[in-house]
């Protein structure tokens, strides 16, 4: 059901979101390039989720979720990807979102500093599986619209990140995406958004301390989004002015200052086309330094023994997110965002792969010694949300030095991963799952996602993640 589309006032940013949703009630009105981009990042996110199920804490999250609804019970209507476990849709969304984000391997929108697909794909797929009647074409349109909402809100930030933006913006985007799938009218969309906003939580404290709760905040956000749409569909009323209001997002989360110009891009620039892949299983803030060091070592045929020191000149956000000292006995989640450790891996192995955080590596004296050769120092960039530019300098034995400027980060739309590289990452993730997929299963899953717009049930691909 839809209502007439009213042009909102310039300061009514909830109204602009509602207008964006209602104007694209016909999925074919979402440009084909945007829907194709949604398929690309859907594939990437399902792959990293399958690998993420191998993370130790995943079993704890699943065990907790099972206490909220028995596996296979009548109320269990959505799947944990890669398994035959079924849970109530909010719990399934929570577990799958945790799996997507817990290795820091999921895609990211750099300008928004938001991992858009973790919350959104997990929540929308759980909703679609429970519903059973969401076409592939509509599902792709919903993904694109939801990513628009999450990232446009994220791009309004003018201050350093304090609350965990990927969870919060992802929750708002996912809620709107499911409202779109439900065919809600203006009031329903506003209630869904208000109910999602009323559950927002998550701060950067988990990041600072290097705990797995960081990914759990993404998981909670996915669950909250499903709960929001469920309540809204039952007619539960919620606050509507949740972005511009006295205690709305801009006033509280962004501390009263927001760059609202980003909202002008709604319907004009599809943000799913600005999302970046992550070539390495670590935060986006570390990806540029890893890629630059790989380039320097490859082009100059260097070994670790030839490198006396590595200095990365980087903006505030890089230093805030990944400039943490190497620690003996550090936990995986700490190491995953420790740039000295990551660059030490590159010096030793030439790469950072899915096995980077095993116990042998975390306690390797060679990596400890190499990490102490690496320093991250301040540049003059005053933008608190900038990832670039960066500059990497290697001091070499014999007095030589090598420098690499990082204007764009590998994996971004300006420096994209090749199709072959994307395929290689997906296959590696599928092979890293607790129940690894066979080559045939992987190819069938890829084919199903690539042709999902032709299916009447978008969630049918979930079955292809399961090992018989």
Image (spheres, grey):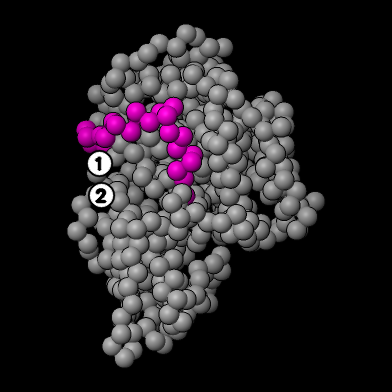
Q: CA distance from mark 2 to mark 1?
A: 7 Å
Of all residues shown, which one is farthest toward the right?
468
Q: Position of residue 276 (x, y in %)?
A: 47, 49
Residue 230 in view of the camera: no
Point out which mark residue 158 bears: 1
Image quadrant in which the N terminus is located: top right
Does 89 sit above or below residue 109?
Answer: above
Q: Position of residue 384 (x, y in %)?
A: 25, 49
Residue 5: image quadrant is: top left
Q: Give the farthest residue toward the top.
A: 4
Check contact, mark 2 vs mark 1: CB within 8 A.
Answer: yes
19, 175: nearer the viewer: 19
Residue 324 placement, left or right of 141: left
Residue lying at 48% horizontally and 41% vertically, measured from the top left: 273
- Residue 125 falls in image quadrant: top right
**263 falls in the magenta region:** yes
Can residue 160 be seen from the camera position used here? yes
Query: SS for tag 2?
Result: loop
Rendered residue at 66%/46% (across/down): 81
What residue appears at the point 30 percent right and 27 percent down from the top-left corner? Answer: 248
Mark seen at residue 384: 2
First along the sequence among labels 2 and 1: 1
Front residue (pair 358, 258): 258
| Spot occupied by residue 298 in the image (x, y as percentages of width and height) | 47, 76
Q: Is residue 209 magenta?
A: no
Q: Which residues are magenta?
A: 254-276
Please indicate whether residue 254 sits to the left or right of residue 66 in the image: left
Q: In the current view of this chain or complex, which residue is farthest to the bottom?
A: 398
Q: Residue at x 34, y 50 (%)?
A: 204
> How many other residues sit within 10 Å of disc 2, few (<14), some (14-19) or many (≥20)?
some
């Amino acid at each position: 059901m839809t209502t007439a589309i009213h042009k909102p006032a310039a300061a009514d940013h909830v109204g602009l979101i509602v207008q964006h949703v209602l104007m694209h009630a016909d999925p074919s009105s979402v440009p084909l390039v945007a829907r194709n981009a949604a398929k690309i990042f859907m594939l990437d996110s399902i792959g990293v989720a399958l690998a993420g199920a191998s993370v130790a804490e995943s079993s704890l999250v699943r065990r907790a979720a099972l206490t909220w609804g028995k596996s296979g019970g009548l109320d269990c209507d959505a799947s944990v990807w890669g398994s035959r476990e079924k849970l109530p849709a909010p719990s399934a969304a929570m577990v799958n979102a945790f799996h997507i984000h817990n290795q820091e391997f999921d895609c990211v929108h750099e300008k928004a500093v938001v991992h858009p697909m973790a919350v959104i794909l997990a929540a929308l797929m759980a909703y679609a599986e429970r519903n059973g009647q969401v076409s592939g074409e509509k599902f792709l349109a919903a993904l694109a619209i939801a990513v628009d909402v999450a990232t446009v809100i994220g791009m309004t930030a003018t201050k350093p990140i304090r609350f965990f933006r990927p969870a919060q913006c992802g929750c708002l985007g996912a809620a709107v995406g499911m409202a779109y799938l439900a065919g809600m009218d203006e009031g329903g969309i506003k209630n869904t958004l208000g109910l999602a906003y009323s559950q927002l939580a998550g701060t950067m404290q988990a990041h600072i301390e290097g705990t797995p709760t960081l990914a759990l905040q993404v998981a909670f956000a996915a669950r909250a989004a499903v709960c929001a749409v469920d309540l809204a569909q039952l007619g539960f009323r919620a606050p509507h002015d949740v972005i511009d209001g006295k205690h709305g997002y801009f006033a509280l989360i962004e501390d009263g200052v927001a760059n609202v110009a980003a909202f002008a891009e709604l319907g004009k620039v599809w943000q799913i086309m600005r999302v970046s892949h992550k070539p390495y299983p670590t935060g986006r803030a570390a990806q540029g330094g890893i890629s630059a060091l790989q380039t320097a070592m490859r082009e100059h045929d260097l070994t670790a023994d030839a490198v006396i020191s590595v200095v990365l000149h980087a903006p505030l956000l890089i230093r805030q997110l990944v400039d943490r000292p190497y620690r003996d006995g550090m936990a995986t989640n700490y190491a995953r965002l420790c740039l000295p450790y990551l660059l030490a891996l590159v010096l030793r192995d030439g790469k950072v792969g899915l096995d980077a955080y095993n116990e042998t590596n975390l306690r390797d004296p060679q990596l400890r010694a190499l990490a102490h050769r690496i320093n991250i120092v301040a540049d003059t960039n005053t933008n608190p949300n900038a990832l670039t530019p960066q500059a990497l300098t290697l001091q070499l034995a014999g007095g030589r030095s090598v420098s690499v400027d990082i204007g764009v980060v590998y994996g971004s739309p300006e420096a994209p991963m090749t199709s072959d590289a994307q395929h290689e990452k997906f296959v590696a993730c599928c092979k890293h799952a607790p129940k690894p997929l066979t080559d045939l299963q992987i190819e069938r899953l890829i084919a199903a996602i690539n042709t999902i717009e032709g299916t009447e049930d978008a969630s049918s691909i979930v079955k292809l993640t399961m090992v018989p």
